[in-house]
Image (tube, rainbow, N blue to C red):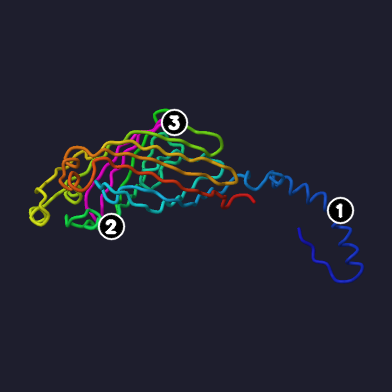
Amino acid sequence: MNARLTNGPRAATIAAALFALSVPSIAAAQEEEDPYAHVSTSERPGGWIVTIGAGAQAYPKYPGADDLGIFPMPIVGFRRNGAPVPLEAPDEGFGFGLLGQDAPINIGPAINFQRRRRDEDVGAAVGEVGWTAELGGFIEAFLGENFRVRGELRQAISGHDGLVADLGADLFVRGDGDSVFSIGPRVRWADNDYMDAYYGVTPAVAAGTGLAAFDPGSGIHAVGATAGMRLGIGGGFAIHGYARYDRLMNDAADSPIVTGFGSRHQWGGGLGLSYSFRVGGRR
C-alpha cells in the first residue's frame, strides 16, 4: 500500500520511521514473490533460447554437378529455456513440429531452397533452371530416445516446379552440455518435372550440344548419408559441422548431363559458429 505524506519535518520523521519498520517485511515479500532472486539470470525459468550464427559450406553447384561451390551457411534456432538442444539433422528442411519438441510422433511444415543452375555452371547450353523454393511438410517418429525416422514431401513453387521427397533415419548421440552428433542414411525421390529440369535433354538441346536426347522418368534419383555435429564450447558458443554424400541412381546417373559434364558422386559439407542467448522469462 502506498501512503501520501505532506511536506515538512514531522512528515519526514514519520516517513523514515515507517520505512525502517517496513524494510524487513518488504524483503520477505520479495523473497516470497521471487524464489529465483539468488539464481543467475541464465538459469531462471521461462523465456526462449535463441541461436544465431553463420559459416561456410561447399556443395555441388547444381544437382549432378562435378564442381563444388562455396556458399554461406546460416545457423538459426529457437527452443524453450531449460529444454535440451533439439535433435535435428543438418540436411532437413527448415520448419518446426506442430506437436511440440518432445512429441514421439510429429508433423509440421518443411521449406527448402535450391540455387539456380546456369549454362556456364554446366559448361554447355543444356537449359537454365531458376532459383527454387520448395514448400511442403514432414512427418517424423522417434523409435526410441535417440533414433528417428523422418520423411519430407515438398512442392517447388518456382525453378524446377517438381515434387520431391526425402526419407531418412538418424541416430543421435548427446554429449556434454549442448553437444549433439547425428548420422544416418538418405533416400531421395523426385517426379518428372524435377527429373526433366536437371537431367533431361530435349531434342533441341541435343541438336545444339551434341548430347543424346534423354527423357528421364520419376523415381528414386539418389541414396546417401548425412552426418552432423553441434559442439558446445562454453559461453553460449557452439561449433557446427556437417558432411553429406549422395550417389545418383537410375535415370539421374544415366543422364548425358551427368555422364558428360557432372558426376554421380555428390559431396557436401560445412562448418560454422553460433551463439545462444535467452530472451524473455524471469530476469
Res. 36 image quadrant: top right
How far across and how far down the image is residue 221, in percent?
22, 40
Assign a secondary structure to mark 2: loop
For the stretch drawn in magenta, what is the main secondary structure? strand
Q: Between tags 2 and 3, which lies in front?
A: 2
Label 1: element kind: helix
Q: Which amino acid does label 2 sit on?
A: Trp
Seen at 49% across and 52% down, the residue is 52
Which residue is depicted at the point 7% across and 55% down? 207
Give the magenta part as a residue range.
Answer: 146-172
Label at residue 131? 2
- Which of the marked residues, 2 or 3, is nearer the chain's N terminus? 2
Residue 146's tag is 3
Mark with earlier residue (2, 1): 1
Residue 167 in the image, given as x and y percentages of width and height: 30, 37
Q: What residue is disc 1 on?
A: 21
Residue toward you, 173 or 122: 122
Q: For this rendering, which residue is in front, 208 or 11?
A: 208
- 253 part of magenta stretch: no
Q: Give the side of residue 260 with respect to residue 132, left or right.
A: left
Quadrant of the image occupied by residue 20:
bottom right
Q: What separation in Å lies between label 1 and label 3 (alpha carbons)?
A: 58 Å
How far apart in space, not on screen, are marks 2 and 3 (Cα)?
35 Å
Q: Residue 152 magenta-drawn? A: yes
